[in-house]
Image (spheres, coloured by chain):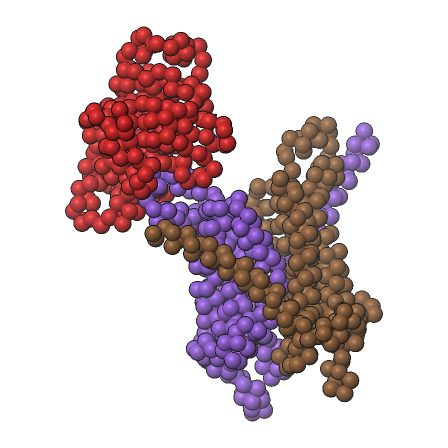
Chain colours: A purple, B red, C brown
Amino acid sequence: MNKMKYRRYKDKAFLYLMFLITIIAITPLASIIFELVAKGFNQLNISFFTEVAPTTLDSMLAKSTGNPVKGGIANGIVGTLQIVGIASLMAIPLGVFVGIYLAENSNKKFSTLVSFSTDLLAGIPSIVYGIIAYAWIVIKITDGYSGFAGSVALSIMMLPLVIRSTEESIKMIPASLKEASLALGTSYRKTILRVILPSAMSGLFTGILLSISRVIGETAPLILTALGSQVINLDITKPTSAIPLLIWEFYNDPYLINMIWSSSLFLMLLVLIFNISAKQISKRWAIQ
Amino acid sequence: MGNTINNNNIALHIEDLSIAYTKDKYAVKGINADIYKNTITAIMGPSGCGKSTLLRAINRMHELYPEIKVTGNILMKDQNIFKINAMEVRQKIGMVFQRPNPFPSMSIYENVLAGYSLNGIKLKKEEKDRIVQEVLEDVGLWEEVKDTLHKKRTALSGGQQQRLCIARSIAMKPDILLLDEPTSALDPISTSKIEELLMKLKDKFTIVIVTHNMSQAARISEYSMFMYLGDLIEYDLTKKMFTNPNDKRTEQYLTGKFG
Amino acid sequence: MKDRLFKISLIATCALVLLIMGGIIYTLAKGALPTFEEYGLGFITSSDWNPNPNNEHYGALPFIAGTLITSTLALLLCIPLSFPIAIFTGYYFKGTKVASIISDIVDMLAGVPSIVYGLWGFYTLRPIIVDLGLSQQGFGIFTASIILTIMIIPYATSLSSEFIKMVPNDLKEAAFAMGSTKLEVIQKVIFPSASSGIIASYILAMGRALGETMAVTMLIGNVNLIPTSLFSSGNTMASVIANQFGEADGIKLSSLIAIGLLLFFITVVINTIGRLIMKKLKV
Ligand SMILES: Nc1ncnc2c1ncn2[C@@H]1O[C@H](COP(=O)(O)OP(=O)(O)OP(=O)(O)O)[C@@H](O)[C@H]1O
Ligand SMILES: [Mg+2]
């Protein structure tokens, strides 16, 4: 009887201990969100979105005359949209096609090789992609730091996720659907593009949104490629700013340091929006 | 005899057809048969005897899986279907599967017209509307769905889905309609609706139906095939086969001794 | 015709993936070549990283050490922290609202950008380390390892909880039927049958830690020496690249690329081991 009691206490104690550790493990998240909101929220105003980042000089002058430092992160927002947008334009069609091939030819040797490479790509640290885009684009093509080089680095990072989500969601489509389409005399191409892909759309969309949310906050590869820019720059062959790059600049500049919180808060929000919409899509469509 | 079909009443001439899923393991063994125009032919036999395998060969579904080996000939109007473009064959020979499989990304309207849109055949709006109404009336679905034609992801019952799949096939005006146990996933009411539909449709098409349900075969078909372990044991008028089968195995099957 | 074109373009895109993969290895190897020609394998074993033009010399050991030490520490710290969460989502609250809330929170943790972790580490974690008297400035191996731990918890958790979920119910029921408590079921049933999956999860989580850049760069102290204690400053392979790549050229640039190549190899090896274990389990 006593032994039984002891076992039950031990069981309870273990549960509480686990609970405590879980709380400890997610405390940093609460702390991060609290810090970002507390320090960054009241800096989010119109000029934050419409003005470019202040220079060190502006900021020094403003500080010395006692005025508030003016400026926003418009150059970073535009740059991020541009860099991530172009990365998506490259990664999504490529990844979808590869995913289709892998789903359709899963037992070929060639597929195994491609699949293995995809796994490798997924594991490579982002800084290495920075080096690669630097060597391929900065040196060879744009002859200097460029937003395009940043896009290339990010697009290779996105690839594995897009490939895998396409492959997985196509594999979930029952073979009968493909047969039904072909039985109507439809060509293979139309069957894949007009019947299979639309039916796999939710999984595909989820994967794409997740891959965007994964790269939108990437800093390291952009330091090696896009570099940053003081102005809004729409030329993809020239150095371009991005929100994470601006945070990095602000962090390293004692005169601009107070802008890191609003920028980080905004970046977090962006990531969250993509993350949550990805989840919503997969939840809502999964019921079907 | 040669390779030509003399008789105008023959829709399909199957000649020495063998199909193997894995090397030397034949699921269909050297079948010869003529399918007659504007009739319903039922294929029966115990599970695993090769009914689906035979049916799927007729619109060349096996080609999706390169490991499957098909030998022999099937002639349709003097043409060997294995020698012409597979897409063309499939447009003339429609297929309805055991599980209803409407395209989930399309509305009812788009599903009915899928054969046209997917084959890149452009139709005028009035013509589309006409086909959709006509075909849905044919399958007895028009009254039930005419208000939700353009809604995506409408919830249809299994029977409605299957009738939609039949509609999708016959919208293409095929010569031949193949059905693989189209009612086995359905309730009795939906089943009888589909049976009525098939009896009506045989004026327009030649129908080949695989069924496990002997009374179904007796109710709707003129001709019946009995298959066993990949062989075509008996092929005759349904009335004859059900009353006076030639082969003992057929008799045993029909009297429920096995299967 | 169009079908052929379509199939060919599918294959072509796959070939492009192989080309990218091959190109990455080629580019890294070619960039690293001058360094290995100059120093041979001594590049890996030398701890002398000296950009001073008078006696310029590059050795990668301090960074290899920094990377391995921080990642291993992060792995060790991550195990006790992520195991409870995995047990909650994969066993105690399997399939319930609680589990989905916990895993949503964990997912959010995975979504925080590296640079934001760095800021939080700098402004919140570092002062705590200083207050505790663990180190003067609060930078160093230990601080970097803590931030890495927090960053890899989501990966370890979500992967290992999948394996815990996969333990068949009848096994658990059999144990309960004999009067076991939940803890005993964890010890006797879940742990033995899910252990290799859980281990693979941790290995893959460590693979993440190896390449983390920004947060580590902001907290490790950026000193090009082999760390001598838990609280001494150092540099990791990723952080030295991030810090010095911009101003580098010649042999220094080549050495940084060589470090990138080594980092590539280490992560590939670790990730492949993790995935091989996982693949074995799925069969
Ligand atoms: N995809 C496949 N791969 C390998 N063998 C198969 C495959 N499909 C069917 N077979 C084999 O071929 C034989 C005939 O199968 P088939 O599906 O044609 O039978 P069936 O008469 O339609 O049976 P049921 O009434 O159960 O549908 C069976 O022995 C089966 O095991
Ligand atoms: Mg069958």
> In the displayed structure, does residue A239 sit left or right of residue C125?
left
> In the displayed structure, does residue C268 sit left or right of residue B204?
right
Q: How many marks?
A: 0
**Which residue appears at 71% of the width and 69% of the height?**
C236
Where's residue C145, x and y in %? Answer: 73, 64
User: Image quadrant of ligand 1?
Assistant: top left
**Which residue appears at 58% of the width and 81% of the height?**
A256
Q: Quadrant of residue B188?
A: top left
Q: Is residue B138 in sight in this rendering?
A: yes
**Which residue appears at 68% of the width and 62% of the height?**
C265
Above or below for A51 versus B238: below
Above or below for A136 versus B20: below
> In the displayed structure, does residue A279 sit left or right of residue C283?
left
Q: Quadrant of residue A24?
A: bottom right
**Which residue appears at 66% of the width and 55% of the height?**
C271
Where's residue A217, x and y in %? Answer: 55, 67
- From the viewer's side, name the closer residue of C73 and C80: C73
